[in-house]
Amino acid sequence: MIPFLELKSAYQEQKSEIDAAIAAVLESGWFILGPQVEAFEAEFAASLGVKYCVGVGNGLDALHLGLLALGVGPGDEVIVPSNTYIATWLAVTYTGATPVPVEPVAATYNLDPARIEAAITPRTKVILPVHLYGQAADIDPIMEIARRHNLRVLDDAAQAQGARYKEQYVGSLCDITAWSFYPGKNLGAYGDAGAITTNDAELADRVRVLRNYGSRVKYINEVVGFNSRLDEMQAAILRVKLKKLEEWNARRRTIANLYLENLQGLDLVLPEVPDNTEPTWHLFVVRHRQRDDLQKYLTQNGVGTLIHYPIPPHMQEAYKSLGIIEGSLPISENIHREVLSLPMYPQLTDSQVREVTTTLRRYRPTKR
Ligand SMILES: Cc1ncc(COP(=O)(O)O)c(C=O)c1O
């Protein structure tokens, strides 16, 4: 069986360093907002060429606190992709604002800049692109539209640690960037973790206060804040794993290229990479008209796959109240019907990748 994802072998690669980092935190007796968090924030920011990083509890909180720092609140609208993980929309809802979905470019799965202006209203405050599957959204035209309409841009980089757009790392391209370090991400903690990065000192400061009960000085509360802090243990683990990020992303790139070479000529839509982007290959996503049949065949033949994502946010029970009916976001709905993610993680061997591609080449759709 080739699993879709397996996290134990990455731990084995760094076991002694990870174990030592955890032991050092335990022995320090300091667990919240301490030297490990500060060091990780500095190291992650430096690795991206951005001025500020503020660690928070998870990726959803990074989005939520980032939106609050931009001043988003009840009555506002935030432009979001119609195809994304639901966290992107939930963060908007938490602020009291309304998510306004815009369709993607089908070939890249990312927000289509050409469709954004039609969705802007006097209530629009922020555009929230997502670098889905680890490939940078087309940020330049999005920033240009935002500047022209006096809007701010927060990007969701949960899947894009190490992704580049026009030679620049994701994390410094927009007003503020939200990160998730959920264990399965390219840079993953051993529990929940997240962060924001920004070049704007004021935005960084607002998130720093919001994550810690609205407090800068102990027991002095400036705003109604939250408890959402990256903890010392996760920060220490992330510092060790950050050292491997480039190498592991390079290995993902090699795996992606093997897939791309060996899957040519099949009745599959393969990922398309625009010239100006370097993806992290967080996920390797193909499309097929009989996706469910293909997934069943792969499972029966020992290949683990997942669907990112089976139901678009507007068709979830949770968002019924928005009244966006089925059929109104056809590009996204079609993507959700056809996408399938193949096994992808740095420790996958070349022979495992070949086994996946050979199995795919033998697939014959069940007659309908
Ligand atoms: C695109 C996207 N946004 C946001 C999140 C939320 O991150 P977290 O699970 O750390 O809250 C995730 C991952 O889970 C994600 O994939």
Image: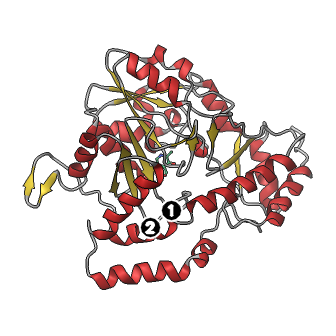
x and y percentages locating residue 115 in the rendered image = 54, 18
Task: Confirm if mark 2 falls within 8 A of ligand 1.
Answer: no
Residue at point 90% right, 40% down?
265
Numbered disc 2: secondary structure: helix
Task: Confirm if mark 1 falls within 8 A of ligand 1.
Answer: no
Residue at point 74% right, 51% down?
256
x and y percentages locating residue 178 in the rendered image = 41, 45
Q: Quadrant of the N terminus?
A: bottom right
In the figure, residue 9 lies in which quadrant? Answer: bottom right
x and y percentages locating residue 319 in the rendered image = 43, 35
Dot placed on the residue nearer the N-terminal end, 2 or 1: 1
Residue at point 58% right, 35% down?
166
The residue nearer to you, when weighing 205 against 272, is 205
Residue 327 visible, this orientation: yes
Decide: few, some or many residues near mark 2? Use Cα within 10 Å; few <14, some 14-19, many ≥20: many
Q: Is residue 36 above or below residue 282?
A: below
Q: Is residue 152 above or below residue 337?
A: above
The residue nearer to you, when weighing 250 against 209, is 250
Q: Quadrant of the C terminus?
A: top right
Q: Amino acid at mark 2?
A: Arg
Q: Mark on residue 239?
A: 2
